[in-house]
Amino acid sequence: LTTRLYSQLAAHPDWLTAENKARLARPLPTATQRMAQARLFQGQENCAQVRNILGDLSAQYDAESWSHLAQCYPGQPGLALYAAEQAVARDPSPFYQRQVAYLAYATEDYALAKASWAQVPATEMVDNDVQAAARSAKLAGDEKAFTHWQNVASQRGMSDLKLESTPVM
């Protein structure tokens, strides 16, 4: 029942007063309740609440919660990467692999970034992803993977891989 209530409140944030929102930002007792609770607080402006609610880093959190938490550590890429890796451990879908790839690059773990990009189908990538994958392969010293990403870029009609710039998610 609580989870359903939180789902409805997340869909209709205007139902909450500032006082109710503040009260709901206090962590609830169970991991299941905290996962539902954290979903009320979407967007970068609510990251303090998300970190407060999910900050115990419970092993019981699902992939969506770990990914949500990873997005709330923009100034701490190592912690963000840890959270994103927890998401992938629970759901190795391309969405979470992509998140790990960008965060691994941010922490200069180019081998992990390259390995994560290899798990994302090229058909699910945007051009910035292809550039990031190529850059990760190049910095990881894997010429075979770099050549693969060059070929993908060429097939898409991408004229320049822009290897000198930082990848943007």
Image: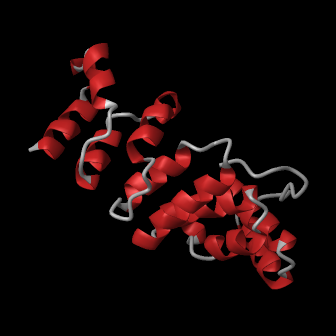
Residue drawn at x 53%, y 51% is 70
Is the image coloured rainbow, by chain, by secondary structure, or in one colour?
Answer: secondary structure
Residue 18 horizontal/vertical position (percent): 31, 15
Residue, far right: 164
Q: Residue furthest left?
A: 1
Q: Is residue 87 above or below residue 56?
A: below
Q: Residue furthest bottom?
A: 144
Which of 152/143 is in front? 143
Placement of 70 over or under 138, stated as above or below: above
User: For the N terminus, which image quadrant?
Assistant: top left
Q: Is residue 32 left or right of residue 54?
A: left
Q: Is residue 117 visible?
A: yes
Q: Position of residue 28 (x, y in %)?
A: 26, 42
Image position of 13 with respect to 142: above or below: above
Residue 91 visible here = no
Residue pictured at 14% horizontal, 42% vertical: 2
Q: Position of residue 156 (x, y in %)?
A: 70, 63
Q: Residue at x 48, y 48 (%)?
A: 69
Q: Quadrant of residue 31?
A: bottom left
Counting from the top left corner in percent of width and height, residue 78 is at: 67, 56
Which residue is pictured at 76% across the width and 78% down the height?
148
All told, the count of numbered labels is: 0
Image quarter for residue 57?
bottom left
In the image, taking residue 142 as reference, residue 10 lies left or right, namely left
